[in-house]
Structure formats: structure tokens, C-alpha cells
């Protein structure tokens, strides 16, 4: 526990960071230490787990509030277990007689803080949902546009198949802890010059579980849970964008005491495309055309996310002109319709002309007049008006 780093330090953000700043910091750190990008790097794997743990706490308003107030003890009831209540000795001297810290912190958190108050009276053997498991998957731009299937492998905690999660060997059952009588908490009293201070902490005999396993299951060593590796095929819907998430219900860690499984959260990372750019459901592309095509007009080949199409570039098209191809963009996720594609043409000026080409171009230029150049005509008119005085 002593080596546990501050969650804000893990993500590299200030304590007052906004939700968007937390999410952005998590995304950068998760990409940096993702196992797929650091194969065989145990240090990166540990940092990836550390980043996920920090994000899970700081992205949840209630957990973050408890962490800001009480540190790790606010989000992990077992943190610092066994240290006793000496740290509170005399700290509440203004209260006469016996003071129950559970009542104080229960009022602050509405009875929901696990280390005191209502949390101490909660049934440790009540069904609880398993933790969510997060995993990142990288896909190409075209896979995001059209949808795809990806095979992923996850590590999760499942209920032990041998003991059914009880932790006890077959033919035996856990016994109610005599010290805490199954509550998982014990009351500690400390006398001070101002009275008796009363607090609660996890029962050291049963570890806060409320039950004692005398004959542990050999398969899970009494924990009731086993680490498993599972390979899944994930359907990535057409139109998904970078950093969006998919939730696979019930595919996370197994529940505790018969509770439901957690969820598998798939974070999608879309690799940039060398040709297309995306903005929402619209797609943008720049297509180079020749000087002659721009002057005389032509049918040019335009790439789209669905393949090549012929597009009629009109006569006299200027460099930088943008055309719109309706319905050629990205499909809407889970709905009908799709965005548009915007094609910006860039007129490329030829280089390395031969003498014959230069002479032909000069002869062509000599046949043109100011009326052939709208922008030049307008420019010189403004220039003339500017200096006519």
C-alpha cells in the first residue's frame, strides 16, 4: 500500500481537473502503455493497470469525492486495515461520552461510505456486481466506416467452478465469523480524556468477509474466484468513431455472492487514413487535377469510401473549389442514412516544361484577354480605384 501512487499523479493532471481533462489524460496514457503496443513489457502492463484504476475512480463523481476527502481509504475499505483507530485518538474531543464515527461519516455520505456508518452495517455477503473490464481495440479508417469483427483476448475474474464462489472445499461450507458475527466489521473503543471514541474497522479474523473458510478450495485457494483468459469476437458497428466505446453486458468480472457479472467496455481507437479525413459523419478529400482539366473541364476519378467514382469537373474550375457528393460519407451508427463527402480540387501547375511546351503556352497566353481572368480583372480594378487620386 505504501507504494501506491496518487491517482492524479498517475494520470498527470491537477486535482481540480475537469471531466474532459481526466478523459483526455486517460486516453493518452492508455494508448502509451497499452499491452498491444508494448508486447512483453511488464512495466508498461503494470502502468496500464494503474492508469485504468486511476480513471475508474476519478471518472466517477462519488468515488472521486471520497478519494479527494479520504484518499485511498475512501475508495478501498481494506486499505490500511489493521492500523487500528489510534489515528483518531482525541481528535473528536468536543464530543462527550461515546462518539460513533460511523454516525458522523454516515451523515456526510448518506450511509454509503464503506469504511464507516452505513457501509459498516452493510451485509458483506450480499450479492454484488462484478467489476467492469476495459480493453482497447485498434481498427483502420475503412473498418470504422464499414464496420468489422475483431477477435480480442481479455483477462477477467470468474467465479470458481469448483466451489461456486464460496471459497470452501467441496463437501464443506464457510462458517459465520464469531468475532464479527457475520457483519465483517468490528467495533473499536478508545478512552480519551474527553470520553470514549467508538469506530468500526474490517474484522481482522475474517478479512471483512463475515465468514471463515476452514478448508479452502484447492482450485481457487479459498478466494472463490479464478483468473481466466477468454477470447471473444466483437462486432464493431459501421460508422463508429475514434475513442467511442462499446459495452458488452455481462462479459466483465464475475459477480460476488451470486451477483451479476460486470461489463466489458471496448474502447475503439481508429487509425488515421492517408487520404480521407473525417468530421462527424462527413468525409473530406483533396484531389489534384491538371491545368488543362481545370481550364476545359473533365471527368476525373474521385476516391470515395465505397470505391472510385467519375465526377464531372466543370470548365473554368478554380484551385481550392470544393464539390459535395451527397450520401457518400460515413453511415450513421445504428440508424439509416449517412453523411456526405466533400471533394476539394487542387490545380497542379506543371513543372520542367520543354522549349516547345513553353512556346505553345506563351502562344496560348497571348490569345487571352483580361475578360478571361475574373479574379485578375477584379483585382486590378480595385487597385486602380485605390490610386486614382
Image (spheres, rainbow, N blue to C red):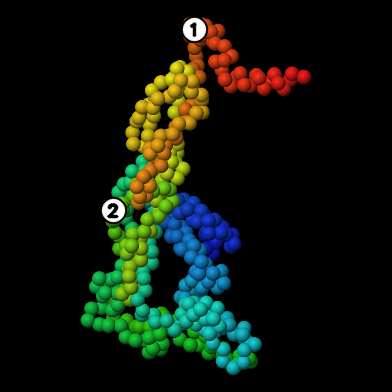
Tell me whether circle 1 and circle 2 mark residues in contact (CB < 8 Å): no
Q: Position of residue 156 (x, y in %)?
A: 34, 63
Q: Nearer the viewer, mark 1 or mark 2?
A: 1
Q: Which residue is mark 2?
A: 233
SS of the residue under disc 1: helix
Which residue corresponds to the image point at 51% horizontal and 63% vertical from the top-left? 58
**Quarter of the image with the C terminus in it:** top right
Q: Position of residue 66 (x, y in %)?
A: 53, 71
Which residue corresponds to the image point at 46% horizontal and 20% vertical from the top-left? 315
Question: Looking at the image, how many numbered discs can be counted on the residues?
Answer: 2
Binning the other alpha carbons within 10 Å of mark 1 as few (below 14), some (14 to 19) or many (20 upward) gives: few
Inter-mark Cα distance, 1 to 2: 63 Å
Q: Which residue is mark 1?
A: 360
Binning the other alpha carbons within 10 Å of mark 2 as few (below 14), some (14 to 19) or many (20 upward) gives: few
Task: Tell which circle, 1 or 2, labels the residue nearer the N-terminal end.
Answer: 2
Residue furthest toward the left?
Answer: 171
Report if residue 41 is visible in the image.
no
Disc number at residue 144?
none
Q: Is residue 283 left or right of residue 238?
A: right
Which residue corresponds to the image point at 44% horizontal and 84% vertical from the top-left? 121
**Residue situated in front as seen by the camera: 374 or 189:** 374
Is 66 placed above or below 307 here? Answer: below
SS of the residue under disc 2: strand
Q: Which picture quadrant has residue 42?
A: bottom left
Q: Is residue 98 left or right of residue 35?
A: right
Residue furthest toward the right?
Answer: 389
Report if residue 31 is visible in the image.
yes
Which residue corresponds to the image point at 58% horizontal and 62% vertical from the top-left? 15
Q: Position of residue 219 (x, y in %)?
A: 27, 71
Q: Position of residue 124 (x, y in %)?
A: 39, 80
Amino acid at each position: 500500500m505504501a507504494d501506491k501512487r496518487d491517482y492524479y499523479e498517475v494520470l498527470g493532471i491537477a486535482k481540480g481537473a475537469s471531466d474532459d481533462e481526466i478523459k483526455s489524460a486517460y486516453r493518452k496514457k492508455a494508448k502509451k502503455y497499452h499491452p498491444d503496443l508494448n508486447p512483453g513489457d511488464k512495466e508498461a502492463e503494470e502502468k496500464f493497470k494503474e492508469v485504468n484504476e486511476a480513471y475508474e475512480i476519478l471518472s466517477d463523481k462519488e468515488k472521486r469525492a471520497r478519494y479527494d476527502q479520504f484518499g485511498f481509504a475512501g475508495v478501498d475499505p481494506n486499505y490500511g486495515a489493521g492500523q487500528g483507530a489510534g489515528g483518531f485518538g482525541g481528535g473528536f474531543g468536543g464530543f462527550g461520552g461515546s462518539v460513533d464515527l460511523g454516525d458522523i461519516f454516515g451523515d456526510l455520505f448518506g450511509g454509503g461510505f464503506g469504511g464507516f456508518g452505513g457501509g459498516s452495517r452493510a451485509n458483506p455477503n450480499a450479492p454484488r456486481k462484478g467489476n467492469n473490464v476495459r480493453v482497447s481495440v485498434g481498427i483502420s479508417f475503412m473498418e470504422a466506416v464499414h464496420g468489422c469483427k475483431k477477435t480480442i483476448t481479455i483477462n477477467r475474474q470468474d467465479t470458481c467452478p469448483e466451489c461456486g464462489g464460496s471459497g470452501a472445499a467441496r463437501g464443506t461450507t464457510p462458517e459465520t465469523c464469531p468475532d464479527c458475527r457475520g457483519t465483517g466489521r468490528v467495533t473499536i473503543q478508545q478512552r480519551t480524556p474527553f470520553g470514549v471514541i467508538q469506530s468500526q474497522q474490517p474484522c481482522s479474523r475474517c478479512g471483512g468477509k463475515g465468514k471463515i473458510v476452514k478448508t479452502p478450495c484447492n482450485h481457487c485457494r479459498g478466494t472463490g474466484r479464478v483468473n481466466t483468459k477468454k477470447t471473444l469476437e466483437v462486432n464493431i458497428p459501421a460508422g463508429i468513431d475514434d475513442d467511442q466505446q462499446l459495452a458488452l453486458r455481462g462479459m466483465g468480472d464475475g459477480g460476488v455472492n451470486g451477483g451479476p457479472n460486470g461489463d466489458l467496455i471496448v474502447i475503439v481507437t481508429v487509425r488515421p487514413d492517408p487520404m480521407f479525413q473525417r468530421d462527424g459523419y462527413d468525409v473530406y478529400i483533396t484531389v489534384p487535377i491538371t491545368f488543362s482539366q481545370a481550364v476545359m473541364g473533365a471527368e476525373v476519378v474521385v476516391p470515395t469510401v465505397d470505391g472510385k467514382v467519375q465526377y464531372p469537373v466543370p470548365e473554368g474550375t478554380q484551385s481550392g473549389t470544393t464539390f459535395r457528393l451527397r450520401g457518400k460519407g460515413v453511415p450513421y451508427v445504428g440508424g439509416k442514412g449517412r453523411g456526405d463527402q466533400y471533394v476539394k480540387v487542387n490545380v497542379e501547375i506543371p513543372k520542367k516544361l520543354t522549349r516547345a511546351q513553353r512556346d505553345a503556352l506563351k502562344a496560348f497566353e497571348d490569345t487571352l484577354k483580361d475578360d478571361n481572368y475574373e479574379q485578375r480583372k477584379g483585382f486590378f480594378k480595385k487597385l486602380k480605384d485605390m490610386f486614382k487620386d
